[in-house]
Amino acid sequence: MNIENIEAFVYVIHYGSFNKAAEVLYLSQPSVTARIQSLERELDCRLFDRVGKQTSLTDDGKKFLPFAQQLLQTFQKSKIQLKQKRTLPNELRVGCTVSVSNYIIPTIIPKLKHKYPDVNYKLSTAASEDIINRVLNRELDLGFVRNISHPNLLSAKAYDDPIRLYVYAGHPFTQKAEVSLEEIGEYSLVFFECGSLDWMRIHRLFASMKQPPSIEFQTDNLETAKKLVLQGAGIAFLPSLCVEQEVRDGKLFPIDFPQTAGISLQTNMIALNGENAIFFNSALDLCKGIAQSIREHI
């Protein structure tokens, strides 16, 4: 069965006339008529009743229409898939910060692999500045970095990760609806430091205190900071995503602290302008799902 004949049949119905269908298909009206007649011969039935200039579907035409639409849609989807397969690279190189590597990539990459099974994925972990340079030099295709702006890069917010105060099970703060700055100063603090403006804002919170909190542990590794809190070594301000599972398991507890409301770590996804748009948009959509999960569990 000729797909062009089916296309002509569906277009005539959709646009309401042979002439309009001919315009859209860049054909002459007799050519569209010939295609419909050929389809009727193949099906051995009349699809249209023609009375003067009026055309209407026969009962057989009405029965065939949903099958014709499905066949045409399947054919068009297959063309898109084949074209997309020809344009996709064999390998996608993704650079990300340590936190993204630990908490975001394990969720995103399997879903990308499911959507683009013929693509292999090469993952690299580095600081934001290094990832930016490698994307600009075409050493990486996509990057997950801190919030940046560059004229040669396509950049979009992947997600915001709220920073909150977390304490271990049994800590006195778990019995309070809200704590003050002074109360925090009474306990040992595990401080995760990544050098971003967000963490500088938290530092400034304690600058005016007569008795600032005792920062007994300072680390640039989120997992280390989290495990120190789990061991009861202190309390810590942490991004919500890195402790999502521990909060669900009742091992760590978020504490409301008004001064940190609105402070979050923003992660952007970057690519060279005009390149890897398919992967960029797909990964961005997946990140939106992760962001929704964060909002539901904080």
Image (tube, rainbow, N blue to C red):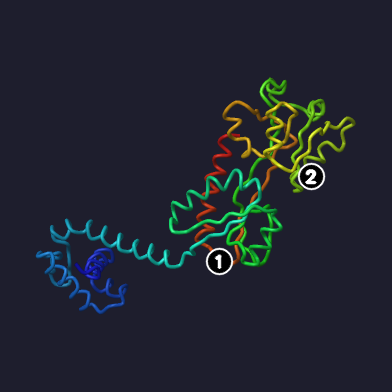
- Of 105 and 61, nearer the camera is 105
Q: Nearer the viewer, residue 298 or 18?
A: 298
Report x, y in % for residue 246: 61, 31
Say few, some or many: other residues with alpha carbon within 10 Å of mark 1 (under 14 / 14 to 19 / 20 or more): few
Q: Amino acid at mark 2?
A: Met
**225 lies above or below 141:** above
Q: How many marks?
A: 2
- Is any atom of residue 156 visible in this view? no
Query: Disc 1 marks which amino acid?
Result: Glu
Report the residue that reaches farthest toward the right: 210
The quarter of the rendered structure image containing the N terminus is bottom left
Image position of 248 (left or right of 255): left
Q: Nearer the viewer, mark 2 or mark 1?
A: 1
Residue 275 badge = 1
| Image: 111 above or below 57 | above
What label does residue 200 carry, if any? 2
Residue 264 seen in render: yes
Q: Tell me if mark 2 has few (under 14), some (14-19) or many (20+) residues whose alpha carbon lies within 10 angstroms of its own.
A: few
